[in-house]
Image (cartoon, grey):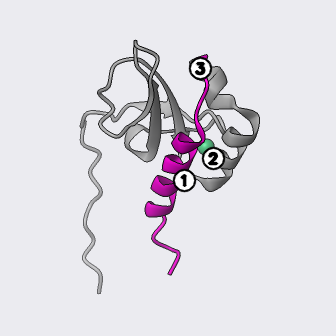
Amino acid sequence: MATTKKKQTLPKKKSPERRCVGCQGTFEKRDLLRVVRSPEGAISLDFTGKKSGRGAYLCKNEACLKKARKTGIIARALACEISPEIYDELEKEIKLGAPDEE
Ligand SMILES: [Zn+2]
């Protein structure tokens, strides 16, 4: 016997959505990885969503990362070169976020 708990749609703060540069899908910010270019031109990953600078978002999908790596779409979005280390970091994050694998 399941307790029928009424699903309440609380007028809670709607989490902001951003578009993934890979699949063009929109996701909640916390489901995306943010690559940010600081005003100084340094590229880094932003896990807080608070770093200042120009950002590009990628969803936690390996296909999107592969696509981004291949097409350089993040580089284009940020008008800046992306070093392989950044992609490696993104890959690591995506894999961490996929607990399905063993
Ligand atoms: Zn995507």
Identified at 29% across, 36% down, the residue is 48
Q: Amino acid at mark 2?
A: Leu
User: How many neighbours does mark 2 have within 10 angstroms: few (below 14), some (14-19), or many (20 or more)?
Assistant: many
Q: Amino acid at mark 1?
A: Glu
Identified at 40% across, 19% down, the residue is 38
Which corner quadrant of the figure contains ligand 1?
top right
Residue 84 lies left or right of residue 2; in this view the side is right
Q: Position of residue 100 (x, y in %)?
A: 50, 74
Residue 39 lies left or right of residue 62; in this view the side is left
Reply above or below: 44 against 32: above
* Residue corresponding to mark 1: 91
Element at badge 1? helix
Q: Name which of mark 1 and mark 3 comes first in the sequence.
A: 3
* Residue corresponding to mark 2: 65
Q: Residue furthest top?
A: 39
Which quadrant of the figure contains the N terminus?
bottom left
